[in-house]
Amino acid sequence: MPYLLILGARSDIARAVSHRFARKGLNLCLAARRYEEADRDAKDLEIRYRIRVMTREFDALDFEGHESWYAGLPEKPLGVLCAVGFLGNQKKGETNLTEAKKIMETNYLGCVSILNVIANDFEERKAGFIIGISSVAGDRGRQSNYFYGSSKAAFTAYLSGLRNRLCRVNVRVITVKPGFVRTGMTEDLELPAMLTSSPEEVARDILSAFEKGKDVIYTKWYWKYIMAVIKIIPEKIFKKLNL
Ligand SMILES: NC(=O)c1ccc[n+]([C@@H]2O[C@H](COP(=O)([O-])OP(=O)(O)OC[C@H]3O[C@@H](n4cnc5c(N)ncnc54)[C@H](OP(=O)(O)O)[C@@H]3O)[C@@H](O)[C@H]2O)c1
């Protein structure tokens, strides 16, 4: 059964994406830490869209287990969406390395560890696609979330390098940079309504980028321009801003 593998499948954005791809008739494998809940999603998706959906328990921080985890899939996926992410607590991380490390390991090392295994398989098969959800937070470090932001910056650079390597064997790598999105990750934050998307809007943009052959997208689209402005603010001024 050809299918799309979704890592971090219980993420609100990932769940919205799974509906978009399921509507197109693509089978799915939902990989999540809370796989009992993923099981419920799977049943719903199967009934709603008449597709096949399997579930797998997956922990991005089980670095040593990733190779055997992937080898244990019954057949290899057509493509993968990586939606794993952890905002964490910036303030806590400043004095507590365990928190800072968890943010960095979840958003960077964990994603890289599993995507390395998948990328090698796709390279050998000369087929596949990888959609990685990074963030606008990786475009410039800010005092409010620089452990998260720097991990996303590293993830964006990783995806760029991977795209550069794999385009030779016809494997696509898409980098998704959302701005603010109303999800479990941001439920305790006050987000500016005008600049905030729903998971469904992000999912629509991801499917559209996939269908149009885009390499890098900002979602909503205007974040590209917001970040272009943020990136050109001279450091002398930027360091004094309360961002
Ligand atoms: N929301 C935003 O404003 C925003 C903006 C830019 C980028 N993003 C990115 O979008 C992606 C999806 O996030 P979201 O907004 O949909 O938030 P979310 O609902 O909190 O999703 C994050 C997902 O990551 C999973 N996860 C965390 N650590 C994991 C681990 N060790 N192993 C496996 N899964 C793990 C969580 O699993 P559990 O369900 O088990 O907790 C959760 O399902 C993330 O990469 C996030 O960084 C979000």
Image (cartoon, helix red, strand yellow):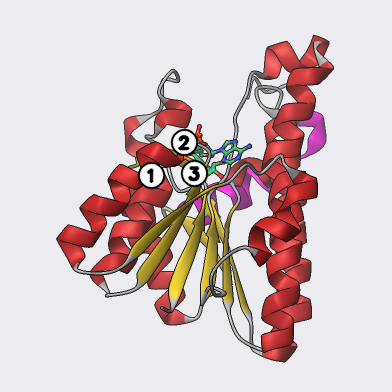
Which dot marks residue 179?
Answer: 3
Q: Amino acid at mark 2?
A: Arg
Position of 52 relative to 222 (above/below): below
| Label 3 element class | loop
Q: Name the residue beneath numbered marker 2.
A: 34
Q: Nearer the viewer, residue 169 or 38?
A: 38
Which dot marks residue 38?
Answer: 1
Q: Considering the image in quadrants, where does the N terminus appear?
A: bottom left
Q: Residues within 10 Å of mark 2 (few under 14, many from 20)?
A: some
Position of 229 relative to 208 (above/below): above
Would the CB of label 2 be found within 8 Å of ligand 1? Answer: yes
Q: What range of the chain is rendered magenta?
A: 222-237
Q: Residues within 10 Å of mark 1 (few under 14, many from 20)?
A: many
Would the CB of label 3 be found within 8 Å of ligand 1? Answer: yes
* Tag 1–tag 2 contact (CB < 8 Å): yes
Residue at 41%, 47% (x, y): give it. 13
Residue 212, quarter of the rendered image: bottom left
Pointer 2 or 3: first along the chain: 2
Q: Amino acid at mark 1?
A: Ala
Residue 24, quarter of the rendered image: bottom left
Measured as percent of width and height from the top left, residue 177 is found at 55, 53
Say if residue 141 shows up in the picture. no
Q: Amino acid at mark 3?
A: Gly
Q: Is residue 186 left or right of residue 235?
A: left
Measured as percent of width and height from the top left, residue 173 is found at 62, 72
